[in-house]
Amino acid sequence: MSTETILNKGTTQNGIVFPSKVMLDLSKLKKVYPTPKGDYVVLENLNLQIMKEEFVTIIGHSGCGKTTMLSMIAGLNPISGGNIAVLGNPVKGPGPDRGVIFQSPSLMPWMTALENVLLGVNQVFPHATKAQRKDIAKYYLHKVGLDGAFDKKAIELSQGMQQRVGIARAFAIKPKVLLLDEPFGMLDSLTRGELQDILIEIWNKEKITAVMITHDVDEAIFLADRVVMMTSGPRAKIGDILDIEFERPRTRKSVLEHDDYYTYRKHLIDFLEH
């Protein structure tokens, strides 16, 4: 392997990560919640580095602190110990460098799909003209298949369509890191598959670093460059990391037919059942 290739992968020959290629760095991360019976340690000594343009999925049992970790990266939950940095800059609160897609789309129900996307676009691109900001919002609504729903109020949209607006809104602010907290967990399997395809199609074009929590092993494999497995709580940390070697762009058919697919699947299930 050439030195250039190694550098572009973000590692040296002895496996040490080059900081210049690290987008998101979690170092000795800790989260503690005080309770009447004493401190409850959700996360402890959690270390993870995620590269530029990488798509990482995170799996683990319910209650292991996955959502807590994601909310800390988003700046929505204070850090009890350790550090989180985006391109070397410590996370001190929410910011436009991190876009979030929640399980529930959290739209303003009285606003239209376009107005909901514009909320973020107007904040992040204040110096753009009104027409330019509207074009950005329309572009991403088009990318998620909502051409005919620009002027429909969020409350009039199905759950799947609302989540499409949530995806458009997150990509439209051009974040450095996209954080996804089980965004398809409440959807039926057909809608879920459609939105996975839409998400990965936009991500393939935008190449934004993405971190996604999921309980679905197949979803984790299909979307990710690496699957990060968290130990059960309390005091959860990274238990294992699985590299997914499938080429991109991927199709569901090619993934399912790949020789390594069931090997990956067994590895993840064995970890979860351990």
Image (cartoon, rainbow, N blue to C red):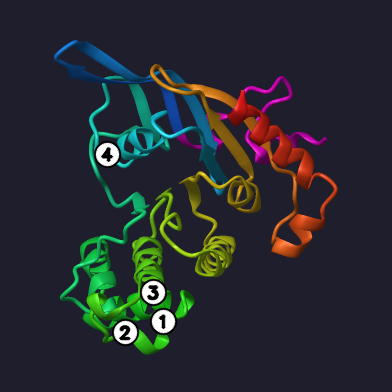
Between 26 and 41, the residue placed more toward the observer is 41
Q: CA distance from mark 1 to mark 3?
A: 8 Å
Which secondary structure, mark 4? loop
* Label 1 element class: loop
| Cα–Cα span, label 4 and label 3 | 27 Å
Q: Residue at x 78, y 39 (%)?
A: 263
| Marks 1 and 2 in Cβ contact (< 8 Å) | yes
Specify the segment rendered in magenta: 1-24
Amino acid type, callout 2: Phe
The amino acid at mark 4 is Gly
Q: To which residue does mark 4 refer?
A: 75
Which residue is under mark 2?
A: 150
Q: Marks 1 and 2, how far apart in space?
A: 7 Å
Residue located 36% across and 80% down the image = 138
User: Quick check: is 12 in the magenta stretch?
Assistant: yes
Q: Secondary structure at mark 2?
A: loop
> Badge 3 is on which residue?
161
Residue 92 in picture, x, y percent from top left = 24, 34
Nearer-N-terminus badge (2/4)? 4
